[in-house]
Structures are given as structure tokens and as C-alpha cells.
Amino acid sequence: MCKGLMGKKLGMTGLFAADGRFVPVTVIEAGPCIVTQIKTRAHDGYDALQLGFEVVAAKRVNRPRQGHMRKSGEALFRHLLEVPVDRPEDYQLGQAITVDSIFSIGERVNVRGTTKGRGFAGVIKKEGFSGGRTTHGSKCHRIPGSIGSSAWPSRVFKGKGMPGHYGVAPQTMQNLEIVDIRPEDNLLMVKGAVPGPASGLVAIRKPKVAKKR
């Protein structure tokens, strides 16, 4: 079975469970994804499928990628993703992988996306610093303060919290529960939040180890 799919985050809403609880969910347009390449253990050293998502015009794809994608059909895709598969011989080029064919309600999945960009940020917003005092003549309110000593270690340690670019980083939310699937609209609803803005690309994968939340 294919162990992953690409999708697009549509936004957040909520659903009422059977016991009356209100469950916050993220709505994802998951697939359909098209198989653009099949990798086998005999030829490539591992079993995997390369999937294409979101059809685009030819002017949006360079010619080498066009030649690669047209082996599976005439459609060209904006995104490609490689996912592991148990039996690659069960799939063929150009086959569509839908959300209801690999996922089920109640299953746990890992969702990977790119966080929202927040531009240049200071240490209070970016690193969670508490800031300096606001009394007794202090002028150090939001600055990072000292970042090291001149005598020893005479350098700044790697990983020190500093002002800088914040966001636009890959992030994975693990073991999110699938609350609902609507295959007629290619919609997948998972409990909780998913990184990234609305219309952001996400990858939904089966976890190696499913944990209870």
C-alpha cells in the first residue's frame, strides 16, 4: 500500500463528534495524486512511488521535468513527492491515488508543512525571551542582552537565540487523528492544527509508529 499523499491546506473548522464533543479540525484537499515514477528494490535499491500533485500549464514546468512527467501521461504537475510503498508492482504509471484508497477514519497520520513566514523578528517573538525590566531607568526592554564573554569562550555558541528570519521552516505534526474523509470532494479532516497558511502544500504520511493521544 502507498504510505503517503500530497494535499493543500484549506483552513480550520470544527465538527461535532457522536458523543456531542466539538472537535477542531484542519481541512486538507488531499490528492488525487498521479503516479509519475515507480522505483523498485531491484532497480533503485528501495520501493517507492513518485507522485505528482496540482496540474499546471506547460510554461510553468521546465523541459527536463516535462519529459519526465510525460512518461506517465500528458498532465504536468507543480509538485512531486516520493513516498514508500509495500508492493510497487501493484501500481502503474499514470494511476490516480485518492484519499479514501489509503486512509481511513480514526487512523493516525503525520502531516508535514511549511510554517508561515513572519519576516525579521526579535528575540522576544522569535525565541520567547522575557525581555528586560521596564523600571529603574532600564533601557534594555526588548534587546537580547549579552551573547557571550570576551575572555572565554571568545565566541558565540552555535544555536544561541538571536534576532533574525522567523518562519518558512519545515515542520511535522505527528499522530494526528483523521476525523472525517469526504472522497467525493477529496477532503481529509484531521484533528488539531497543521503548519502553514491556507493553500499551503502539505504531505500526509502514515506514521512508522502510531501513538495514542
Image (tube, rainbow, N blue to C red):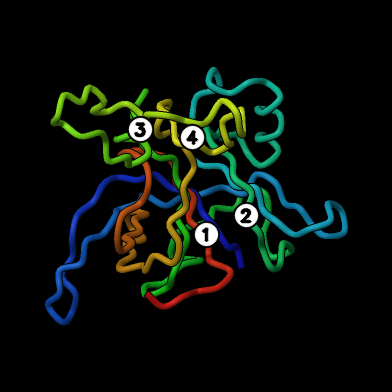
Q: Earlier in the sequence, mark 4 or mark 2?
A: 4
Q: Quadrant of the N terminus?
A: bottom right
Distance (Cα) linking label 1 and label 2: 8 Å
Distance (Cα) linking label 3 and label 4: 40 Å
Distance (Cα) linking label 1 and label 3: 33 Å
Q: Which residue is mark 1?
A: 205
Which amino acid does the dot numbered 1 rest on?
A: Arg
Q: Nearer the viewer, residue 5 or 25?
A: 25
Q: Earlier in the sequence, mark 1 or mark 2?
A: 2
Q: Position of residue 31 (x, y in %)?
A: 45, 50
| Mark nearer the viewer, 1 or 3 | 3
| Mark 1 element type | strand
Q: Which mark is residue 55?
A: 4
Q: Position of residue 129 (x, y in %)?
A: 32, 39
Q: Which mark is residue 83?
A: 2
Q: Residue placed at 45% from the left, 36% from the top?
A: 161
Query: Mark 3: few, some, or many residues within 10 Å (few <14, many ≥20)?
Result: some
Query: Mark 2: few, some, or many residues within 10 Å (few <14, many ≥20)?
Result: some
Which amino acid does the dot numbered 4 rest on?
A: Val
Which amino acid does the dot numbered 3 rest on?
A: Val
Q: Which residue is mark 3?
A: 123
Which amino acid does the dot numbered 2 rest on?
A: Val
> Quarter-wise, where is residue 75 in the image?
top right
Q: Earlier in the sequence, mark 4 or mark 1?
A: 4
Distance (Cα) linking label 4 and label 2: 19 Å
Q: Which mark is residue 165?
A: none
Q: Earlier in the sequence, mark 2 or mark 3?
A: 2
Query: Would residue 211 appear left or right of 187 to someone viewing this image?
Result: right
